Amino acid sequence: MGHPEGPARVRMLQHHLARLGYPFVEPRPATDADLLSVHTPDHIRRVEGGDFHDPDCPRYPNIGFYARLAAGGAVLAAQRHGFSILRPPGHHAGPSFLGGFCYYNNLAIAVRRSGKRTLIVDIDGHHGNGTEAVFHGDQAVTYVSLHRIYNYPGTGHESRGNCLNYPLPARCGRALYVETLEQALAAAGSTYDELAISVGFDTYREDPLASLGLDVDAFYDIGYVLGELKLSTFAVLEGGYIPEIMGPAADALLHGLSEGASGPDGPAA
Ligand SMILES: [Zn+2]
């Protein structure tokens, strides 16, 4: 079996969304200033030079360029309120470390470059230990993560300051997931200028790595709840290892986001 984080997953996602008429734009590679807003010069040097060893992060030819392009995609997504579907993903990469298929933290770079007070919601099935390492203690950012308990990378068992962690039992299902998401958003409060979503589809019920028992329709519900925040929003792809469901799940999430955002305002509180 090949590496689970391969090109088929994004190719199928892109084809599906293109067939449905979603428009696409090409990113430019992130600049040094973009990368340095999150990563140490030494980390960037090691990624660009292939000077690292991690079985989850192969030293593919030109990986430094592709990682830079994925980071540039996230920056563009933040500017255009779009969804970057580039790979490699990012949420396991911290200021000076890589891991879990991630080299640069695409979403974190986009948040730093936006300069806005941001609520990050990470719906990938794994805890975004890299994103937490970047933003822990940062007054301008709240990080919320729902993820499968006792799984890679072994962090996110409890909340730490501005990082609100919600570990969930394997295959917990849609009702508990959505209820927990609503609780998490209530705890995070509403004083933000921007919502940044780390999107993973590895919570899908048959995903081999991080299933939380969600069906494709659950991503509509998740999008709807996030859309109801009515914040300026962008999204960046993380995981999801069943290529066939990436497109339908992304379409469901995007529909939920737009319908939640255009629905009636909730009761005043
Ligand atoms: Zn994941």
Image (cartoon, helix red, strand yellow):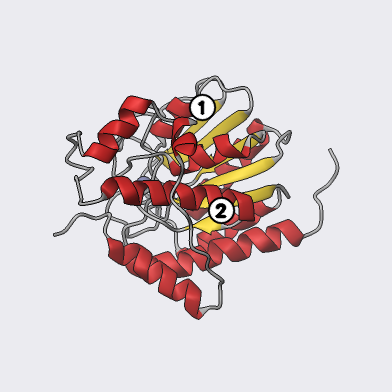
Which mark is nearer the camera, 2 or 1? 2
Identify residue type, mark 1. Answer: Phe
Q: 149 and 236: which one is in front?
A: 236
Q: Secondary structure at mark 1?
A: helix
- In this picture, is 248 found above or below 165? below
Horizontal side, residue 24 vs residue 63: left or right: right
Identify residue type, mark 2. Answer: Ala
Quarter holding the C terminus is: top right
Residue in the image at 45% along x and 31% along y: 36
- In this picture, is 75 found above or below 155? below
Residue in the image at 64% along x and 32% along y: 188
Residue in the image at 67% along x and 33% along y: 117
- In this picture, is 183 found above or below 246? above
x, y percentage for residue 40? 38, 26
Residue in the image at 29% along x and 32% along y: 45
> Mark 1 — residue?
135
Q: Residue furthest bottom?
A: 19
x, y percentage for residue 228? 71, 51
Horizontal side, residue 58 vs residue 160: left or right: left
> Badge 1: few (under 14), some or many (20 or more) residues near its Cα, within 10 Å?
many
x, y percentage for residue 21? 56, 78
- In this picture, is 23 found above or below 85? below
Q: Secondary structure at mark 2?
A: helix
CB contact under 8 Å: marks 2 and 1: no
Q: Residue furthest right?
A: 268
Task: Kindly identify which numbered label has been placed on residue 77.
Answer: 2
